[in-house]
Each structure stands twice: as C-alpha cells, then as structure tokens.
Amino acid sequence: MIPLAKFWTWLGQYFVPIAVAWGYFVRSGADEGVKISRGYWGLVVSLLVGAVLATTCAMYARRARAARIVAVPPNTTFEDKDDRNLILSWGTAMVFFLAVITAIIFFSDRYASSRIYRWEERTPMAQSFWESRARARAETCSSEPCFSMGKRFDDSGKELEYVDQYLPYLTDGLLAAMFLLFVGGMAYLLFALLAPSRTALSSDPY
C-alpha cells in the first residue's frame, strides 16, 4: 500500500503547482487562439490526472478498509505508516481533488470559447462551439492542416504560433475519452469507499 500512497502523493504534489502555473498562462496569454489551445491541453491533462488520482485512491481505500485502517492515503512527504495525522491525510486529499475539479472547470470554460477556423482564414466557420465543429466534420479536406481550434492571426494579420490544429472527431474525441476515464475513476472511488469491505489480506497492510 505504501507504493500507492507514494504515487498518490507524488502525482498530486506535482499536479497542483503545474495546474496553477498553466492556468496563469491560459488566463494571461496575449492571443485568444493560443489561450484556447493551452486550455484544451490543460483540460486533457486535468481529466487524466483526476482519473489516475481517483483510481489510486480507490485502490488504496479498498485495501485499507479490508485491513480496517484509515481509507485515505497518507501524504508520504510528511507521514509514514507508523506516524499518521488524519488532518494532514484528509486535508491533502481535499486539496488534490479540489485542485483537479477547479482545473477542469477553469480549462473547460476556456476551451468552450473555441470556434473552429479554416487554417488560413480569419473568421470562424460558425459563431457557436457546436455549429463550428459540425461544419468542420461535414467538410472534406484533402491537405492538412485543415482547421484550427481558434484564430491563428492577430488584428494586424500576423500569423500566431502555438495555435493547435483541430482534427474532426479526434480532437474532441480525446476529450470525451478522458472525461469517461475521469468519471470511471470517480465511480470506482465511490465504490471502494461505500461497498462492503473484504477480509483483510494480511496482517501487515503496508
């Protein structure tokens, strides 16, 4: 169980500051298309990290409940199996999950402002999130790149760097897959916390 707790602590402690820093770049970027692209990747990573954190916590919780010990993983930076502090353990879990949920909401809001553009055009294909995607999927493009997530040119007509290509079905399909992983991880965590516990597997749960 300690390897699970170490991985949980490592992943959460790295994600929180990286998400804050990435959120700053998404918020303060100079160009809308660049901010949308950054928001997209922030959302993908946040959903994936949330799924992994939830699954790791669930795996720990199932074994911990079977061994009749505290279900939340310890923060192994400050705790070990012989010296637990429940305030620190539960506080760490709350910080990790609040950070994930906040990041998902923040990056979702940024990506929701996306309108699909043809790669070399200055105006979006439609003025709504869904309609612009429907039109992109309906078009035939023989030479990529075909579409971008946002505007690739500033007001002076200069081409912007770091505006990502939009791939019909694949770009938003990846988001859908990550969302399903996240929901699955959270469902597994709820099951691990609420389902009847099993018999202890050994006398030393660690």
Image (cartoon, rainbow, N blue to C red):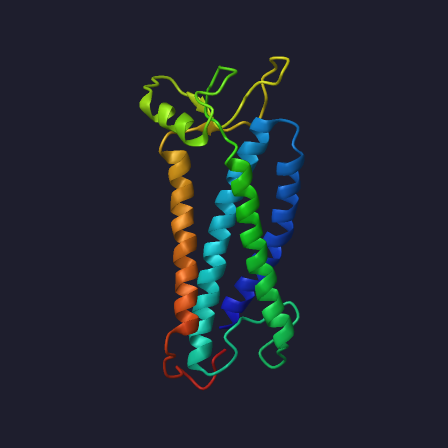
Rendering coords of residue 74 (x, y %): 58, 71
Q: Is residue 182 above or below residue 29?
A: below
The residue under the point 41% across, 35% down is 171
Q: Nearer the viewer, residue 64 or 43?
A: 43
- Residue furthest bottom as drawn: 203
Residue 75 visible in the snapshot = no
- Residue furthest front as drawn: 127
Q: Nearer the viewer, residue 162 or 111?
A: 111
Horizontally, residue 164 falls left or right of residue 18, namely left
Horizontally, residue 138 falls left or right of residue 111, namely left
The residue under the point 40% across, 52% down is 181
Residue 53 visible in the snapshot = yes
Marker count (numbered): 0
Rendering coords of residue 155 (x, y %): 63, 16
Rendering coords of residue 72 (x, y %): 53, 72
Q: Is residue 39 above or below residue 3?
A: above
Q: Nearer the viewer, residue 160 or 2?
A: 160
| Corner quadrant of residue 154 | top right
| Corner quadrant of residue 27 | top right
Rendering coords of residue 198 (x, y %): 36, 80
